[in-house]
Image: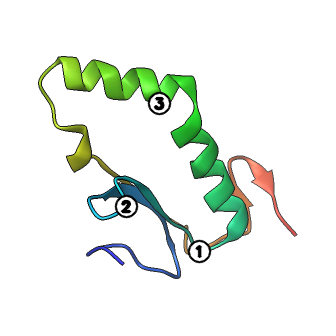
């Protein structure tokens, strides 16, 4: 697991030089599916193309987000 990715709380992705693809890290299967859908989307592919055209190395892109400590309310919805 990459530095800074807490396997219990982090949803994230970074480029794998070994796999030559995006590697997903997720605490729960549902969150992994959500991130996988984003990485496969046309919008993400266009974003990668645009940043490459601007001279950025997309293989250095790293996305991560931490799960909230209090998971009772998320995104304005209450979870039971």
Query: Is 11 placed left or right of 57 in the picture?
Result: right
Query: Is 58 placed left or right of 75 in the picture?
Result: left
Q: Which residue is mark 3?
A: 44
Q: Do the CB atoms of the residues marked 2 and 1 lie less than 8 Å apart?
A: no
Distance between the alpha carbons at the discs numbered 2 and 3: 19 Å
Q: Which residue is mark 1?
A: 27
Quadrant including the N terminus: bottom left
Dot 1 alpha-carbon crowd within 10 angstroms: few under 14, some 14 to 19, many 20 or more: some
Q: Which residue is mark 2?
A: 19
Query: Is 25 placed left or right of 18 in the picture?
Result: right
| SS class, disc 1 | loop
Image spot of residue 40 (x, y percent): 57, 37
Quadrant including the C terminus: bottom right
Foreground mark, 2 or 1? Answer: 2
27 or 53, which is in the foreground? 53
| SS class, disc 3 | helix
Residue at x 51%, y 75% (from the top left corner): 9
Q: Is residue 53 above or below residue 21?
A: above
Regarding residue 64, the answer to whether it shows in the image is no
22 or 79, which is in the foreground? 22
- Residue 47: which quarter of the image? top left
Image spot of residue 27 (x, y percent): 59, 74
Distance between the alpha carbons at the discs numbered 2 and 1: 21 Å
- Residue 55: which quarter of the image? top left
33 or 79, which is in the foreground? 33
């Amino acid at each position: 697991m990459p530095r800074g990715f807490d396997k219990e709380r982090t949803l994230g992705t970074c480029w794998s030089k070994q796999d030559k693809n995006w590697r997903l890290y997720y605490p729960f299967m549902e969150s992994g599916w959500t991130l996988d859908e984003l990485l496969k989307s046309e919008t993400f592919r266009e974003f990668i193309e645009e940043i490459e055209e601007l001279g950025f190395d997309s293989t250095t892109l790293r996305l991560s987000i931490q799960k909230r400590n209090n998971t009772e309310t998320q995104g304005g919805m209450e979870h039971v």
